[in-house]
Image (cartoon, grey):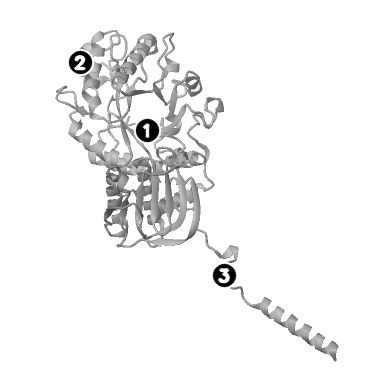
Amino acid sequence: MKNRRVLWLVVIIVSMVLALISLPPLHLFTPGTIQINSTPAVAPELREWHGGTGELLLGSGSQIVLDPAYAGQLQTTARVFQQDLGTEINASLPIALSSKPGKGNFFFTLKTADGGIGNEGYILGIDASVTINAHTTNGIFYGTRSILQMVRASFNHMSLPKGHARDYPRYQERGFMLDVGRKFVPLAVLEDYIRLMSWYKFNDFQLHFNDNALGAGNKPDWRHQYAAFRLNSPAFPGLAAADGSYTEQQIQELEQVASAHAVTITPEIDTPAHDLALTRYRPDLVSHRYSKEFLDLSNPATYSFVNSLWNTFLPWFHSSQINIGMDEYNSRDADKYRRYINTYDAFLKKHGKTARMWGSLSQMPSKIAVKNDIILEDWDNTWANSVDMVKKGFKIINANDHLLYIVPHASYFNDFLNTRLLYERWEPYIFDLNYPYLNLQPGDPHLLGATFAVWNDKYTITSVADITARIEPAFPVLGAKMWTGSTPATSYEQFESMVGQIGQAPGTHF
């Protein structure tokens, strides 16, 4: 009898166990059931992301809160963010001051102990509120671009995934150069280009202010060939191009927009070549040995005139770096050419500026050493061998023509950049995909970053819309490479799909 009771007890226990096993799982705290937010859609992709759970829903009751200790520095960034966010959520959030974020608000502060994010990085936290910590206003600004892109990519355009990010650039130079010398681009379009650049965290907008038709200086009618100088000052009556130029007031407006969007305007007045606009204005300065678009480096008046140009136009710009041109002069005058470079390096130093020039020294051999505090935009592997230039101590910006030049409607350079090739195979330290000995080593401290360029050689058939159509697909890919550095795990197709979700830069009118 006792054994039967034991047997029945065993049967009952086994039945209960089987019944419990057959029940559906409760999904309370099992590890696989907590949905951790994946890396949000941001271009360039966030350097570090630690996903939380759930989303923060934005509402009309939210505020943009500034740390009172830094309110004066953050006001402009806050206003730009207020305007851009307002177009996304259809509500203009008020800007307030407080040392605490407050629930559902955006909080900006320049207080952070994280030295690893550098001058342009930021710490982003999304939980009960959104906080951005950075060392500079530019870092805060880049954080706001990431927030806006997340909002754009959300299903309701009103929410943010909870999580924590550390985001910072791998390269300090993330540039775009535009030839306005041969194709005038209206001020409003330049301002839209700045907004487009900032959307993908570019920070340097170089404007090439003077140039002429290809080979114009070698033609008998050189005085009637197309040439343009785009800066318009009463100090040089008649020099500014009749088909478009920029006054000091317009440049100041452009500088204001650029500063508000964490972009630096780098001016370029290209000498001593590409100067038909200058030699027609001052025929006494024209070269007697070479192309009529070359300034005569044997004439002391050349230096006086170029000095007067820089003395007039240098105060128009806020940048600490100035591009002085120096490309494609005749190698038979290499000595004079190198002395000319050193002259304007010293000239800019006296004005507290750093000289930048197009890399040309490999093609201009001479015993005269050029000061290696000049930054080289290395545009051609023959004109300037990047490996050799680094050995000589120069800082380098990769502007390689075969990879990074756009010449609309031309066959000899890219009409459109090969964005798939650049995304999958290129890095800023690569100057040639076929000959690795021309490339720098990853992490070389001499490499500042990269810039891509639009040259308007075909100015008679190139429209502003043509330029826009070519740069729009280039910005997200090159922005990712210059900010993140290495090719991410995301495929090109996935990246392009993400860019589509992010959409057009706010405030633009393309």
Quadrant of res 90: bottom left
Mark 3, mark 2: which one is toward the viewer? 3
Q: Sequence-wise, which precedes: disc 2 or disc 1?
A: 2
Secondary element under disc 1, as helix, strand or loop, is: strand
Task: Name the residue rendered at 81%, 85% in the picture.
Answer: 6
In the rendering, at what x and y percent does residue 509 appear?
27, 48
Residue 508 seen from this side: no
Other residues around mark 1 within 10 Å, as few (<14) / some (14–19) / many (≥20) = many
Q: Is residue 85 shown above or below 29?
A: above
Task: Name the residue rendered at 40%, 24% in the picture.
Answer: 375
Measure how far apart labels 2 and 1 are at the Cα level: 29 Å
In the rendering, at what x and y percent does residue 371 appear?
40, 16
Question: Which residue is the site of mark 2?
Answer: 282
Q: Nearer the viewer, residue 88 or 64?
A: 64
The disc at residue 453 is: 1
Other residues around mark 2 within 10 Å, as few (<14) / some (14–19) / many (≥20) = some
In the rendering, at what x and y percent does residue 354 appear?
35, 23
In the rendering, at what x and y percent does residue 56 appear?
41, 61
Secondary element under disc 2, as helix, strand or loop, is: loop
Question: Which residue is the site of mark 3?
Answer: 28
Secondary element under disc 3, as helix, strand or loop, is: loop
Q: Sequence-wise, which precedes: disc 3 or disc 2?
A: 3
Other residues around mark 3 within 10 Å, as few (<14) / some (14–19) / many (≥20) = few
The disc at residue 206 is: none
- Quadrant in the picture for the N terminus: bottom right
Report whether 204 appears left or right of 245. Answer: right
Disc 1 marks which amino acid? Ala
